[in-house]
Amino acid sequence: MTNKTEINDELRSKYDETLLKSGVRGKYAVQYAAGTNLVLLDPDVAAAFPTEEAVNEAL
């Protein structure tokens, strides 16, 4: 088992460190949450709707 303090955690030369430090955590969290509504239908219920649009209209 390797001790974490022994790991050499250096960036590779091809990565620009200034670009990596300007990131914003959760920048797209609101948009992601707004676009991830997922509803799973039971197979017998899904069989009653011919298309995804028909399901959305019913909901």
Image: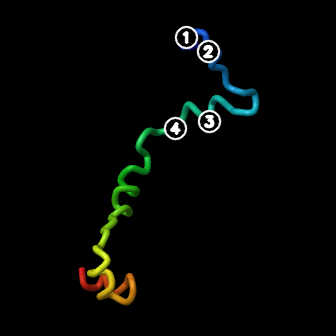
Contact, mark 1 vs mark 2 (Cβ under 8 Å):
yes
The earlier-in-sequence mark between 1 and 4 is 1
Classify residue 36 by image quadrant.
Answer: bottom left
Q: Which residue is mark 1?
A: 3
Check disc 3 and give the amino acid type. Answer: Leu
The answer to whether 56 appears left or right of 1 in the picture is left
- Residue lying at 60% horizontally and 10% vertically, measured from the top left: 6
Q: Most extreme residue toward the right, as rendered?
A: 13
- Label 1 element class: loop
Q: Which residue is mark 4?
A: 23
- Residue lying at 31% horizontally and 82% vertically, measured from the top left: 55
Classify residue 5 by image quadrant.
Answer: top right
Q: Residues within 10 Å of mark 2 (few under 14, many from 20)?
A: few
Of badges 3 and 2, nearer the viewer stands 2
Q: Is residue 51 above or below residue 42?
A: below
Q: Residues within 10 Å of mark 1 (few under 14, many from 20)?
A: few
Check disc 4 and give the amino acid type. Answer: Gly
The earlier-in-sequence mark between 2 and 4 is 2
- Label 2 element class: loop
Q: Is residue 4 above or below residue 36?
A: above
The earlier-in-sequence mark between 3 and 2 is 2
Classify residue 10 by image quadrant.
Answer: top right
Of badges 2 and 4, nearer the viewer stands 2
Of badges 1 and 4, nearer the viewer stands 1
Q: Which residue is mark 2?
A: 7
Q: CA distance from mark 1 to mark 4?
A: 29 Å
Front-most of residues 38 and 50: 50
Q: Position of residue 49 (x, y in %)?
A: 32, 87
Q: Position of residue 2 (x, y in %)?
A: 58, 13
